[in-house]
Image (tube, rainbow, N blue to C red):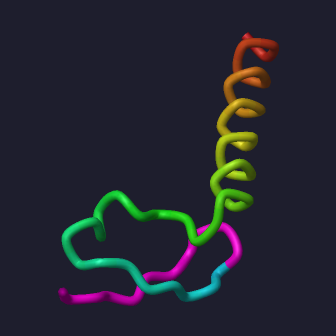
Amino acid sequence: MEYVTKTCPICGSEFVVLEKVEGKAIYCTLKCLSVAQGKVKREKVSTVISV
């Protein structure tokens, strides 16, 4: 098994994942995933309100 190091776009920490799932692993923890999803939801709401 080959591993690669990635950097989380939310918190900036480095984490290690299997090479074959590199494209699917974006966030280092579920906390960072939920923060990212919260940003997306807020952006959608603000877009609807501003129109």
Q: In x, y percent, where is residue 44? A: 68, 24
State the quadrant of the N terminus. bottom left
Tell me how many marks there are.
0
Q: In x, y percent, where is residue 6? A: 43, 82
Q: Which residues are magenta?
A: 1-11
Residue at x 43%, y 86% (from the top left corner): 16
Q: In x, y percent, where is residue 34? A: 71, 48
Q: Nearer the viewer, residue 32 or 41?
A: 32
State the quadrant of the C terminus. top right
Whether residue 36 is situated above or below residue 40 in the rendered picture: below
Q: Is residue 21 magenta?
A: no
Residue at x 55%, y 88% (from the top left corner): 14
Compared across the picture, whether 11 is left or right of 49 comes to: left
Q: Nearer the viewer, residue 41 or 33?
A: 33
Whether residue 47 is situated above or below residue 51 in the rendered picture: below
Q: Nearer the viewer, residue 44 or 24?
A: 24
Q: Nearer the viewer, residue 1 or 8?
A: 1
**Quarter of the image where one finds residue 42:** top right
Residue at x 65%, y 37% (from the top left corner): 40
Residue at x 66%, y 67% (from the top left corner): 10
**Quarter of the image where one finds residue 33:** bottom right
Q: In x, y percent, where is residue 50? A: 79, 17
Q: Is residue 7 magenta?
A: yes
Compared across the picture, whether 19 is left or right of 36 comes to: left
